Image (cartoon, rainbow, N blue to C red):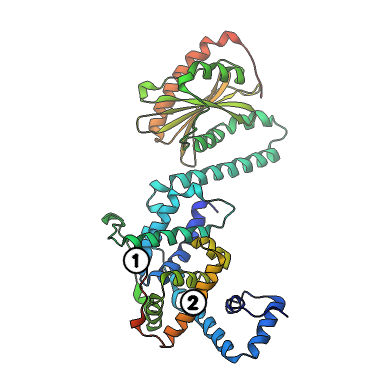
Amino acid sequence: MSSRDAVIAEIPRLRRYARALTGDTSTADDLVQETLERAMQKWRLWRRDRDLRPWLFSIMHNLHIDQLRHARPIDYYADEDLPDLPHRPEQLDSLEIRDLDRALALLPLEQREVLLLVGLEELSYKEVAATLGIPLGSVMSRLSRARSRLKAILSGETGPHLQVVRS
Amino acid sequence: MSTPISEDDLLAYADNRLEGSRLTQVEAWLASHPDERDRMEAWRSQSEKLHRAYDAVLDLPVPPRLMPAANASRWIELRRLAAVAWLVVGGLTGYLLRGEVSSPLTPSATLAQDSLPRMAAIAHAVYTPEVRHPVEVGADQEAHLVAWLSKRLGSPLNPPKLTKAGYALVGGRLLPGSTGEVAQFMYEDARHERLTLYVQPKSAAAQDAAFRYAREDGIDVFYWVEGHFGYALSGNTGREDMLRLATLVYEQLDDTSAGNASHGSKKSG
């Protein structure tokens, strides 16, 4: 498999994670597109002995943090690059998904990332630590807090008024 | 059995990442702690919920804007790497098959000649993207470059001038080829388009060969064998343009080889 094919093979995983992380299909795909572009620019920095997936996730993590930090409108692509196929988010937006989107949005970002990388993307705890650039202990404590908090949110023990806003 | 069950153990349990005796210990502990067991069930159901909700994304068609091929320019680096890998694999396969098929003939001579455009294209793909070290010896030391490469290749060798076509000599390097030393000269125009001229000493058995054209994974290569050398000019500017440039090179080298015909030095790989 060529390097390009290897990256293309990761696109569905990047989209799934981005979708769960941002709660919105088109925002997610913007993030995926930026991630792919950044990966191209940094291609030479990828060490071949490292797995491609955590490397791509770490690029996405950094971009996402940057975007939240700067929170400015970003012109992602020119008009002629607009997708030929319309997105079909209605396929995804069942009630259950919207509930989960809302619940995840109530988690602080640092907890949401860890929860998704472990629970959805099934990265090892070590890979999550490397992806986010944090110690293993922080992965475990954030995961524990994320799980407890999500449990409380899903069982209605905490209302939207408790929303924690962090960036 | 002495280590108390920690929160980390429970997390790993919920994620199905515990094995062996630790798993048994945690399961035993949970059996006597129903509240904790319920908590673990809830944690596990979170992961299941996540998959149920978002796994569908994996099956969605990838929008064209996310397909890297669509925005080609940034992937050039990547594609060049892929091209190199492909060429090397192809070359190796060709080499192995050749040994099978044509061993009674003069394999090294045939190989040397047939592999010329391929080897040239590989060298082109490897060195033209190079920013800091495109050449070993720069054009600012052209006299040294010429003397050095002529000595190593065993015959006088002069890089042709392509200034008429807008290309300046960047410099050159010595490379290992399929039959020994090979020289590569690199040229660049104002738009930073690069050409390489790959020069390989002709093996004793090889015949002179007229102009030929090969396209090796997107790289146009014009090659020919004459005098003491086999030559291959590689570039990415399109066949027409490359033909014009190759003709320019050919004319100049023709003069050189005529001038050097009296040397009669011979070198085989």
Q: Are marks 2 and 1 in contact (CB under 8 Å)?
A: no
Name the mark nearer the viewer: 2 or 1.
2
On whether disc 2 and disc 1 are found on a single subunit, the reply is: yes
Residue type highlighted by circle 1: Thr
Where is A152 relative to B223, above or below? Answer: below
The mark nearer the N terminus, 2 or 1, is 1
Dot 2, crowdedness within 10 Å: few (<14), some or many (≥20)? some
| The quadrant where residue B194 appears | top left
Which quadrant holds the N terminus of chain B? Answer: bottom right
Residue that badge 2 annotates: A145
Rendered image: mark on residue A27: 1
Which quadrant holds the C terminus of chain B? Answer: top right
Where is B107 relative to A44, above or below? Answer: above
> What chain does badge 2 belong to?
A
Q: Nearer the viewer, residue B197 or A154?
A: A154
Evaluate whether residue A124 shows in this view: no
> What chain does badge 1 belong to?
A
x, y percent for residue A44? 50, 46
Mark 2 falls on what kind of element? helix
x, y percent for residue B120? 53, 32
> Could you tell whether B41 is left or right of A39 in the image?
right
Rendered image: mark on residue A61: none
> Could you tell whether A123 is left or right of A37 in the image?
right
Residue type highlighted by circle 2: Arg
x, y percent for residue B73? 38, 46
> Could you tell whether B190 is left or right of B14 in the image?
left
Q: Nearer the viewer, residue B147 or B82?
A: B147
Spatial CA span between label 2 and label 1: 26 Å
> Could you tell whether B240 is left or right of B196 in the image?
left
